[in-house]
């Protein structure tokens, strides 16, 4: 599935091409029996995920170590291909010397023949001519030998260079895989620690609940974005319920990869926002939240100006912008959008003229495993409020983007996302 490949954060557990999977868990559990619900993972499930993530990381470390050893061996002057290349180089040098000697023999034989006077006998002239002919034949053979030796030397050197480049490429990929596996391991460990803390302390006010009527809709985001440009679009957050929400936190996250889906381009993309009443652009915080809309009355909506910037150095690739919303009431109740709404777009190289393109359309991520599955998506419908001036950093959050729990699947992993209030400690 295309979006699964786009959203995956280049997780690789070995030198081979990774089997990359993405699963977005719901932020909230519903009231159905355990056999029917797709609620947040249990401690036991997260322990399993953390153990699997550690196994993936350990394998990645081992693969990186093996790749480092392979590079060291390939770069060694005593490597078989290095010895073969040196031998071929020496043979080519000897062939070149032999050709030079043979050419000089031809010169000497011709000079001897030319030096014969009219007093030379027929036998002397015949012998001189024979010597010249033999020298020419030897020079021809030496030339052919030199050509063959040169070709063998080039072939041997190419084989050595190719092996060294391949070893270095494998090491680069292994190091990237280790970095990704470590990030997933850390995220899985963090998710497990939070779940254990919640289990030990309990959550005051009960679990947050899914609210399909709190919707987020993106408009004006083109389906193709050119690197080196800034693209403005809008995010509309709507409280479609019949009750006021004291605080609503809009959530937005952008992820991008190159065309292979393996190289992460997140460092080259930036998401900013501003309220309808302000022209100042702010970067979406590191938990992917914007300032709260406080309050948001029943049936109200709020439009947020968004800006996507892609660095000019970004290669052609794929991207997706996720949006959602979470609410918190003064009486301790909370909830939010059951799903992350994903809007896919293509990244065109800088200078490209994409022509007229349609707006990006929302799509739903599908479960990648039987153990962790996202709930069905809520349709996005409209919402008018104002963004609070205090900002999300001053609000105690319970629904922030929590973590990735890595589940080993062959050479790949599963990235799991769960949301809690921004800034909370569970």
Image: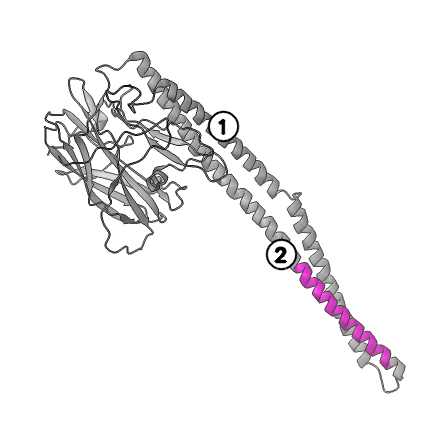
Mark 2, other Cα within 10 Å: few <14 / some 14–19 / many ≥20: some
The location of residue 29, given as percent across then percent down, is: 26, 22
Q: Residue at x 65, y 44 (%)?
A: 77
Mark in front: 1 vs 2: 1
Q: Within the magenta stretch, is there residue 406?
A: no
In the picture, the disc for residue 58 is 1
In the picture, the disc for residue 154 is 2
Question: Looking at this view, is 318 or 213 the one in front?
Answer: 213
What are the residue bounds of the magenta stretch? 125-150
Left/right placement of residue 246 relative to residue 267 reads left
The location of residue 330, given as percent across then percent down, is: 15, 19
The local secondary structure at tag 1 comes to helix
Q: CA distance from mark 1 to mark 2?
A: 40 Å
The location of residue 367, given as percent across then percent down, is: 34, 32
Mark 1, other Cα within 10 Å: few <14 / some 14–19 / many ≥20: some
Considering only vertical position in the picture, is 95 above or below 133?
A: above
In the picture, the disc for residue 173 is none
Q: Residue at x 65, y 43 (%)?
A: 79
Quarter of the view holding residue 333: top left
């Amino acid at each position: 599935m295309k979006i699964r490949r786009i959203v995956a954060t280049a997780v690789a557990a070995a030198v081979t091409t990774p089997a990359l999977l993405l699963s977005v868990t719901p932020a909230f559990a519903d009231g159905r029996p355990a056999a029917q619900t797709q609620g947040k993972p249990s401690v036991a499930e997260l322990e399993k995920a953390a153990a699997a993530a550690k196994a993936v990381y350990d394998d990645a470390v081992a693969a990186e170590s093996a790749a480092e050893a392979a590079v060291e061996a390939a770069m060694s002057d005593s490597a078989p291909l290095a010895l073969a290349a040196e031998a071929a180089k020496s043979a080519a040098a000897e062939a070149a010397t032999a050709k030079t000697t043979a050419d000089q023999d031809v010169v000497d034989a011709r000079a001897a023949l030319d030096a014969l006077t009219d007093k030379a006998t027929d036998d002397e002239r015949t012998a001189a001519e024979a010597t010249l002919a033999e020298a020419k034949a030897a020079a021809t053979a030496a030339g052919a030998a030199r050509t063959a030796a040169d070709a063998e030397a080039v072939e041997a050197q190419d084989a050595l260079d190719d092996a060294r480049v391949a070893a270095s490429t494998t090491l680069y990929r292994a190091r990237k895989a280790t970095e990704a596996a470590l990030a997933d391991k850390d995220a899985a460990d963090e998710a497990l620690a939070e779940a254990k803390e919640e289990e030990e302390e309990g959550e005051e006010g009960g679990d947050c609940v899914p609210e399909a009527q709190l919707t987020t809709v993106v408009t004006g985001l083109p389906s193709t974005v050119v690197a080196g440009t800034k693209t403005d679009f809008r995010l509309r957050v709507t409280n479609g319920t019949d009750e006021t929400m004291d605080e609503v936190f809009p959530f937005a996250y952008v992820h991008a990869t190159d065309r292979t889906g393996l190289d992460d381009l997140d460092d080259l993309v930036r998401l900013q926002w501003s309220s309808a009443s302000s022209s100042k652009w702010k970067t979406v915080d590191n938990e992917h939240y914007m300032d709260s809309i406080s309050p948001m009355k029943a049936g109200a909506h709020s439009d947020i100006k968004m800006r996507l910037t892609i660095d000019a150095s970004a290669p052609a690739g794929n991207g997706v912008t996720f949006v959602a919303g979470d609410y918190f009431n003064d009486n301790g109740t909370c909830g939010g959008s059951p799903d992350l709404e994903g809007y896919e777009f293509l990244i065109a190289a800088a200078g490209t003229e994409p022509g007229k393109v349609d707006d990006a359309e929302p799509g739903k991520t599908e479960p990648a495993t039987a153990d962790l599955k996202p709930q069905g998506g809520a349709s996005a419908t409209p919402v008018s409020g104002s963004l609070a001036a205090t900002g999300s950093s001053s609000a105690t959050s319970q629904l922030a983007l929590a973590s990735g729990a890595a589940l080993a699947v062959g050479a790949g992993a599963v990235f799991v996302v769960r949301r809690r209030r921004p800034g909370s400690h569970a």
